[in-house]
Image: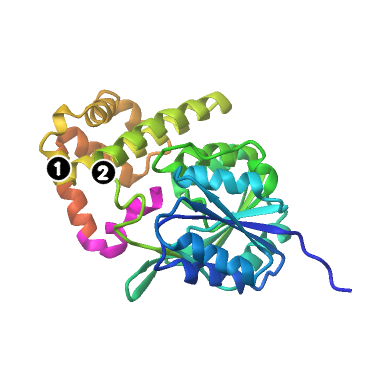
Amino acid sequence: MSEVLPKVSVIVPVYKVEEYLRQCIESIIVQTYANLEIVLVDDGSPDNCGKICDEYAEKDARIIVIHKQNGGLSDARNVGIEVATGEYLTFVDSDDWLENDMVETLYNNIVNHNADISCCGYYFSYVGENVASVVEDGLYIFSGSENMIMQYIVTGIIDVIACCKLYKAYIFKETRYPYGKIHEDNYAIIDVLSLANTIVVDNTPKYYYRQRKSGIAGSADALVRAENLVNMADENKIKIEDRFDNPALGQLILFKYYVMAIMFIIFDKKHNKNRNNIYVFTKALNEIRDNFYGFKKNKYLSQNDKLKLWAIKISVNFYKLLQMVNNKSKGKMQNNNLALFD
């Protein structure tokens, strides 16, 4: 008799993606890892997404469909977590799609390396072009919560996004995504990594991350995104300082996301004109300038971060100019690097 592999619950929040939903679901159905529980959470979608979910549930007994009132991505994920019965969980956004061996690859890595979380690489998917998130493939194994959080904040080897990962179910026994927030992955990542003992990262791309302006983050107002980033950074700094004796790590997450918040405002035509009257902008800017020497001495600050620090101290417009030059030199992927924080 062949071995029965553990059940993997695939949680898919669904909202206003009628054009892309079939491709997403079909890429899950054909996974080479067959013991799946596919949880489609129709988050009150006003189009035909609910009907499409029901259609696929009639064809495949592994599919469970939940219809609920609209509550946002985090709420839909949390409902899926509550329903899931698998020993492992993974999340897929309903406008994205997978290589047919993604789940199998993630599972093999989690077993082979005795890990609690397994990660794979992904493509930024544009119309007619897929760009790998990481130029070179590589496999990394990290143990210890503080070390894993450091790899997330400092090196970026551990990516923030909830998708492209396979989790042991215990990680989400109590962990939930924050209701009504943008950048929900960033809010939850410290909690997730704090609960894991070991994580394996295989940068081979197995996930297609569709880039579209009508997505949740892409359609959000720049000020709303900046406010969420600043609030998230404040919360995560406190979490890190409460759990680890490493204030430099907490300070660094504040710096990185305050810089991102500043960038959202200065590159937005609507809000840049009035930026000095925007609380989150002045808060982030003053925090960086007032604590310039503290940030400068931070052992985790990279050369690129130090350049940002100096530029912001000199002039926000000077920082903006440097960022524009950098974006132009690195092309499409750099222009969309904010997607990594959705």
Residue 71: within the magenta? no
Disc 1 + disc 2, Cβ < 8 Å: yes
Query: Which quadrant of the structure image shows residue 182?
Result: top left
- The extreme left residue here reads 273
Relative image position of residue 72 (x, y in whole percent): 44, 45
Query: Which quadrant of the structure image shows residue 208?
Result: bottom left
Prevailing secondary structure of the magenta residues: helix
**Separation of marks 1 and 2 at Cα, in angstroms:** 9 Å
Please rate how many residues cluster around mark 1, counting C-alpha atoms within 10 Å: few if below 14, some from 14 to 19, many from 20. few
Of the pair 251 and 299, the residue shown nearer to us: 251
Q: Amino acid at mark 2?
A: Asp
Q: Amino acid at mark 1?
A: Lys
Q: Residue sitting at 46 percent across and 32 percent down?
A: 236
Q: Is disc 1 placed on a helix, strand or loop?
A: helix
The residue tagged 1 is: 270
Q: Residue sitting at 13 percent across and 41 percent down?
A: 317
Relative image position of residue 95 (x, y in whole percent): 43, 63
Residue 285 seen by the camera: yes
Residue 196 seen by the camera: no
How many numbered dots are placed on residues in this image? 2
Relative image position of residue 307 (x, y in whole percent): 26, 43
Relative placement, left or right, of 252 versus 9 is left
Q: Residue sitting at 41 percent across and 43 percent down?
A: 183
- The extreme bottom residue here reads 128
- The extreme right residue here reads 1
Q: Residue sitting at 18 percent across and 46 percent down?
A: 267
Relative placement, left or right, of 47 versus 99 is left
Magenta residues, start to end: 328-342
The residue tagged 2 is: 221
Relative placement, left or right, of 271 versus 341 is left
Of the pair 109 and 339, the residue shown nearer to us: 339
